[in-house]
Image (cartoon, grey):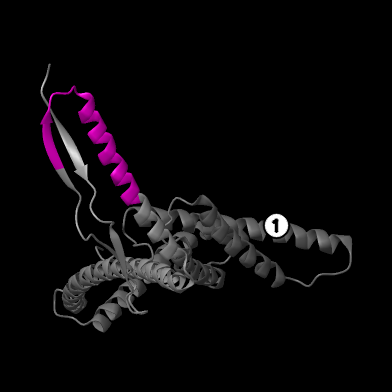
Amino acid sequence: MTSSITPTLNQSPPMNLTLHHHPPHSPFLHISPLLSSTPSLKFKCSSTNFNGENNIKNKQGGLKDVVYGIVDEQVQSLLEKEENKGLLDGLEKAAERVEIARMELAEIEKQEAEAKKVQEYVKQLEARASEIEECQREILEASQLVKEAERSLAAGPDGLTENEIKAIRKNKERLESIKAAIVAAVVGTLAGLPFSLAQLTNITELIIPLGITFASCALYGVTYRYVIRRDLEDIHLKTGAAAAFGIVKGLAAVGAGPPLEFNANSFLSHAYDGGISVSENLLIFLFATVGLDFCMKLRIISPFPIESSE
């Protein structure tokens, strides 16, 4: 036999539920159970088995279920009432407003973060602007130094001004052109002397032909220097200039002869004389070209334009 404690449940008076109805503006609905008395348990010692304990547990579980069921029914009935539906709708709308406010707050925080980034970027730009200003100042200082250097170079080593230096260069160019004219005239005249001697019998008759050859070759020397410039290896320019002067001078000599008649003999005579005259003048100017080219390569005559080192 085992000794056990058998509880005896004394039922208290019924449980009273009191509903406190708050004012309409309050969103809370409060339900408070008021128990006039609590159920009391009395324990007695008896000699029974453990089945009594299981019965006690079953009775307590059933009591809890009854209490929870009554509370659920009361809450459900309160929620189903029309006057409480407005409160529930207000709660839903308030929850929606809270959610909207939360989203707006997140957007404001995002905008603040972007504003901070913009401020940082503006600060970086201001720092770079100051660097740019410093660089501009340095550039201005460097440009001033360059201008001073240009002025000092324009003054020349002897303290000459730029206009004086230009005048000196022009005088040098004129001198080199005169040298080219002299060389071409001398070489061309010597080259044309045999042709003149072959055509004339008196020495006094050489003055006019030699004078014309001297003048034309001098003019050719000046023109040749400005045409060839510093391209001394261009054979086309050299031969082209000589051919142009030779053809023009040869045809001019034919025009100074007897007039052309409308017969075959006159045509053949003028053609023969023109060929001879052009050939002679081509040879004269080719010799003048060789003399000028030789002197330029030896730097006796400076090509156009004169370099500063010369």
Q: Nearer the viewer, residue 119 or 28?
A: 28
Instruction: Write the residue at 66% across / 70% down.
Output: 252
Q: In the rendered view, does 212 fall on the left or right side of 299?
A: right
- Type of residue at label 1? Gly
Name the residue carrying label 1. Answer: 275
| Vertical placement of residue 190 versus 69, above or below | below
Q: Position of residue 186 (x, y in %)?
A: 43, 63
Q: In the rendered view, does 211 fall on the left or right side of 76?
A: right
Residue 195, picture quadrant:
bottom right
Secondary structure, mark 1, is: helix
Residue 209, picture quadrant:
bottom right
Q: From which residue to which does the magenta span run?
A: 42-68
Q: Nearer the viewer, residue 133 or 38?
A: 38
Residue 193 visible in image: yes
Residue 197 visible in image: no
**Which quadrant of the figure contains the C terminus?**
bottom left
Q: Main secondary structure of the magenta part?
A: helix
